[in-house]
Amino acid sequence: MVQLNILSHIVQKVNNAISLEDALNILVSEVLLSLRAEACTVYMVDKRQSQYVLVATKGLNEKMVKHVRFGLSEGLVGYVGQREEPINLEDANQHEKFLYHPGSGEDKYNAFLGVPIIHHKRVRGVIVIQQPEKIKFDESEVAFLVTISAQLAGMFANSEYTGEMRDLLSSGIAKQKRKDVVFSGISAVPGVGIGIGIIVYPLADLDAVPNRKTNNIQEELVIFDNAIQSAKDDIAKLSARLSNTLSKEELAIFQAYLSILDSTSLDDEVKEQIKEGNWAQGALRKVVKKYTYQFAAMEDEYLKERAADIKDLGRRILSHLQALQPKKIEYPENTILLGEEITPGDLAAVPEGRLRGVVSVKGSTNSHTAIIAKSMRLPTVMGIKGVSFEKIKLADIVIDGYLGKIYINPSQSLLDNFAKLAIEEKELEQSLEQLRTKPAETPDGYRIKLYVNAGLAADAGMSLSVGGEGIGLYRTEVPFMSRESFPTEEEQRIIYRQLLKTIAPKSVTMRTLDIGGDKSLPYFPIIEDNPFLGWRGIRVTLDHPEVFLIQVRALLKASIELDNLKILLPMITAIEEVDESLSLIKQAYDELIEEKFDIKKPEIGVMIEVPSAVYLSKEICRRVDFLSVGTNDLVQYLLAVDRNNARISSCYQSLHPAVIRALIQIVNAAHGEGKVVGVCGEMASEPLAVILLLAMGFDTLSMNAASLPRIKWVIRSFSMSSARKILNEVLELESASQIRLLLDQRLVDAGLGGLIRAGKK
Ligand code: PEP
Ligand code: MG
């Protein structure tokens, strides 16, 4: 019987090895000491060559290490790999698959036990023990080798991305080219970033704090007050550091941090815990946990991300309570930050001009880190999986923010290639910067208006800085989400007024409350089996005219003397909904006129985001001033694809022929009635789709601020006549993939390939 303590002894010794080669040599020797075997050999798969390579042995001729290579289906080793299970033979020489490698010294062995080394369903190698005597290895020996092989699997996978495996394999007879190890995540900010990986560790570990009774409540209260003050000082310092880089609106994110620290609820709750006898650290952990759980459980993606903010603050306060000095990090000239959860504070801590990119395991495109990284134009990949950061610290890293990929210790040729693309990208950015003040006009004189979608204060500032002609969609639910009850008319008026004022004289299209679906308010939960087909958007507000009327009154009052407001109605599916909404808006307007407010009637529009509204576009247009197509929902409802379901994300195709035909129908209906029509869904920021939207005749496009310069470039590069020709070609095609391929080609032909991949061509 092989004992467990022998196994753990081997694992420990192997883990202490200084290199993969060393680890393999220790392993084969140790296995021989523990089993009835005279040879132990490890074969590794060389993927590029589709071969097994003998990488370590004790008992065979050690001079053959790295020199014995054979095909993946050859010999008993190949057979083990193909079967993906242990093979235990009394007399291997008699087996039909037996393959003799001259000079290996294998001829004296009969008994053979081979076990595959499998990681993530892929065979990475085979470990073999052999014996001269014709015996079958017993079950405990098989189990032992299976356990060892599981250890090896993890080691092989790690060595694959640290580059050790590549070095080991390429040091054999056939010199190999370096392999570029790549990991995938989500593209949060496009762009190419090249630099050295610096790992960011969390400041302090809240989870590790125990509850502990205090005998001196007064002292704990003072300690807590001091820690809060120090955390505030930290944030103020970080914010000051970025003050030259970020706009006022973006710096507001740090203001939000400070207001959480100032909030009486956090302060009071922690102090209450302390007064009950818990020490300050335990009290803090309890309260921060409660808040992070509350936020993390929210359906809304934006609010979910706020959990990260609270956790970051909690750690900052804790590090002061523990009097931990933050470790001094040396940031190289070209720093790439890597970590489990990179925070805005981490970005701010890097000296100006040194940061080249960000890679984070947690976070999404909605997180504050992503928002700030976007305005700092830092290529960012989030949701990266499978990287053991500890092993790649100080490694060379290349970020491809377009495809959401990172390359670790890349080959010189890949590095050179990306360096070239980064230079081209800079040139591209500079030429786009020159377009800022130029109109979005095709070479043959067709003018289209480009607006920005906003939901955060940061977006408003951005919309002006990128040369947007106003805000084409302001999602009013955002201020509703970040509070504890419906905001009052006056609270709403102040928020809307601030935005209208910032953007004036340009216009702001404010959409009335669009909750339900994936957006629910913490104080107004909507729980349904099929929320996207349920009580959503206008259905909710028409059922609650008091909520709708307060909002419309606040909007109208906010626009006094600015006169730059447009009102947009979400999720309209029937004419009655339009009529009812218009009558409520009229009611609010009449009331305010009666109350002696001097208000100009705003333009009113309807979102087309449900198939029924597509067919009713004409009738809707007769009642309102403009249409705005919400392609995010329209695609979801036309193709029956939940827009948030990652499993079917490949079915979510905005270039589906049905979507294209629906869009044409909407434009024709609107123009037939002499009304303006635009797109405010994500499709308006996709360069390929924009060629088609232009050709269809859309008057306006509204998108995230970061995309606007690129979309302007598309408009200024395609004449209306060439765009129409492409649309006609597209209408002949029957599938989204064919359409994408064709558009891709047309974009590259026009010299705009840089919009969809790294580089500028
Ligand atoms: C849309 O559906 O396209 C849209 C712009 O609205 P939202 O993404 O807020 O649902
Ligand atoms: Mg929508």
Image (cartoon, rainbow, N blue to C red):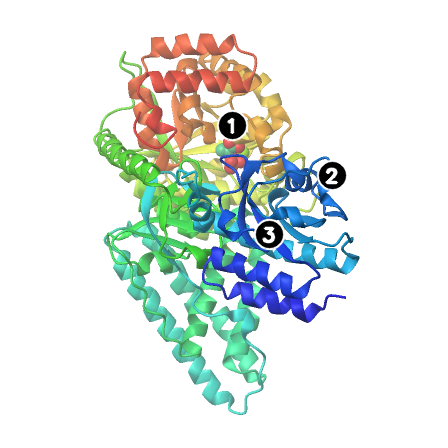
Q: Nearer the viewer, mark 2 or mark 1?
A: 2
Give the CA distance from mark 2 to mark 1: 63 Å
- Establish if 744 lies above or below 132: above
The type of residue carrying mark 2 is His
Task: Tell whether circle 2 marks a residue whose Cβ is less than 8 angstroms from ligand 1.
Answer: no
Task: Tell whether circle 1 marks a residue whose Cβ is less than 8 angstroms from ligand 1.
Answer: yes
Left or right: 410 in relation to 120: left
Q: Residue at x 62, y 30 (%)?
A: 641
Residue matched to label 3: 41
Give the CA distance from mark 3 to mark 2: 19 Å
- Establish if 624 lies above or below 108: above
Residue matched to label 2: 95
Could you say which disc has been placed on residue 295 in the image? none
- For label 2, the crowd category at 10 Å Cα-Cα, with few meaning under 14, some 14 to 19 and many 20 or more, is few
Quadrant occupied by the C terminus? top left
- Establish if 584 lies above or below 359: above
The type of residue carrying mark 3 is Thr
